[in-house]
Image: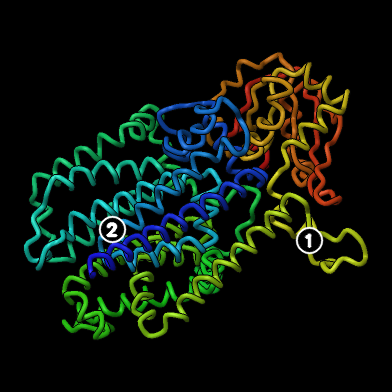
Amino acid sequence: MSIIQNKLKSYHWRKSVIWLLLTGLILRSIIAFWLFPGYDEGYYYLYTRHLDWSYFDHPLLVALTTNFGIWITGITSLFTLRFGTVILYTGSLCLLYLTSSRLFGHQTAKLTLAIVSVVPIFNIGFGVITLPDSPLIFFWTASLYCATIEFFPNHSNSNQNFRPTYRLAVLGILVGLTCLGKYHGFILGLGLIGFCLTSPPHRCVFISRWTGLGFILFILTLFPLWFWNLNHDWISFQFQLLNRFEPPPEEEVLSSGYSLLNVFFVFLTGLGLLFPTIGIPLWWVVFKSSLSQLQILFNNKLFGISKKVKNKFNEYDFLKKQLFILWVSLPLMLGFTLLGGKQQILVTWPIPGYWSATLLLGFYSVQWKQHSSNLIRWWIRSTGIITTAILLLLLLHTTKGTFYKINKYSPFLYFFTPQNDPVTELIDIKQLRNNFAESSELMNALSETDFIFTNAYYLAGLIDLALRPLKDIPVTCFSYDMRGFLFWYDTNQWVGKDGLYITLEQFDKMPHLKNDFSRYFKEFKEVGTVSIRLGGVVVNIFHIYKAKTFLKPYSPEESFSFYKN
């Protein structure tokens, strides 16, 4: 009878897991199909048109992920650009489930999967939009799973009898692939080293031959990254470690001091992206676990572990698992939050740390569930319903302009306008293409053009996506911050030829840009504009200039000096 009951329970949790994965896949596919492309996606699309070992600002894997859907379908569309991300994230969810199951059991793993499935930033940032974060989080989680099997084998007194195995070599490859997704992978590697240093039973990895082999395989896996940089003066590392933190020339730096208020804003932003019902308990369990580890470090006492936890898990074993999770989550969560007090950071930078920390939240949620099963069920389901509704409403607004004031009876009177709405950064490329095609003047200018340029690297990809079906023409960027365009095009090839300058209205209002660009051409004049509408409201205006006879190769340094003077 017990065997039958166990089989029924096994069937039930497997069915629940499959349902969670399929529901999430369908929701993400809907969003991926309808959502307009963002600036970053347009830029990474250009990676696929200039395949290389690595790139100026990111390693290789984002190009392969973005190109996956195009390779297998032969079609370039928003959905095919995002197809690799949508599929890869499902793999990340499976690996997170396996990691949690290995650490704490199937019940905790299912609850962990349910938690991450309702977090908006995970679904969009890792599972819809084509970003370096998608391959990063896949191999990040694969590394966690491999490390979990290695450091916590399934036998009694596992920590005291730990012996390094061949999995350390596999782990070297996986961490290397994580680095090829995004440079955050190096922080993961340091976190794993930190865990082994602070966990006495695991310090033997530093004298193991498998660790040496893993390090060699790690370096070999990074071949695309270091080979490309070796041939380009290590410019990627200079950018990530130094240049990225320098303010752009048009921004006046008012203060170089440290701001605790900015730290608080970064913290609140993280809570919002996670959704408060997930973000607040997540930070609480991380804080509680950190105090537990500090208590052990200074007083050699156990702290904050319930009797039920002690009865189910060996105390020592659990604390090592807790330490492991903190080492792969807290450096990003705390590090980038504190860095936000010094300078602006991208909202996605600390997110992999939150992802790892959900392993702890899943574990403690099981303990809370023993006190109130209905409360935990209501917590997850209500969060899922609310976040899904918010995502679908935002999708409706970004594609239809639902929340804009259309008439005086609109409930959103003066609240949502294109000027204060961040969704205007998502460009309807089909509308841009159609408006171009319907204008004989713009089509004539395009037909007489040898190349297109814009003033911002992130606009170039969107322009390329919009206009390539009308004419297969190079699209580049003239700016002090050219990113990959420094290596993709040699502007010498266009000397004596005609160009087309396309930019948004906010940049068109900056006279120094037009003054700078006009120096490179014999004639520089505006030939038209294209208005992008959303819900009947103009949200963006593109200005198009005909630039006749390119006089000399473009120089970012010269333009930088021109602007400064």
| Residue extending farthest right | 408
Q: Residues within 10 Å of mark 2 (few under 14, many from 20)?
A: many
Q: Nearer the viewer, residue 212 or 562?
A: 212
Q: In the rendered view of the protein, which quadrant contains the N terminus?
A: bottom left
**Regarding mark 1 in the picture, which secondary structure is present there?**
loop
Along the line of sight, the residue nearer the viewer: 556 or 167: 167
Q: Position of residue 317 (x, y in %)?
A: 17, 70
Q: Is residue 166 above or below residue 311?
A: above
Q: Mark 1 highlights which residue?
A: 403
> Does 543 appear above or below 256?
above
Q: Quadrant of the C terminus?
A: top right
Q: What residue is shown at x 50% (from left), y 68% (from top)? A: 258
The reply to whether residue 345 is in sight is no
**How many marks do you count on the picture?**
2
x, y percentage for residue 134? 46, 46
| Percent of width and height locating residue 377 | 47, 75
Residue that appears at 37% across and 52% down: 94
| Residue kind at label 1, given as amino acid type | Phe
Q: Amino acid at mark 2?
A: Gly
Q: CA distance from mark 2 to mark 1?
A: 44 Å
> Disc number at residue 310?
none
Q: Is residue 278 visible?
A: yes
Badge nearest the viewer, 2 or 1: 1
Left or right of 452, for residue 230: left
Please, what secondary structure does the residue beneath circle 2 have? helix
Considering only order in the chain, which callout, 1 or 2, is on the residue closer to the N terminus? Answer: 2
Callout 1 crowding tier (Cα within 10 Å): few <14, some 14–19, many ≥20: many
285 lies left or right of 304:
right
Above/below status of 5 relative to 523? below
| Labelled disc at residue 191 | 2
Q: Residue at x 21, y 77 (%)?
A: 312
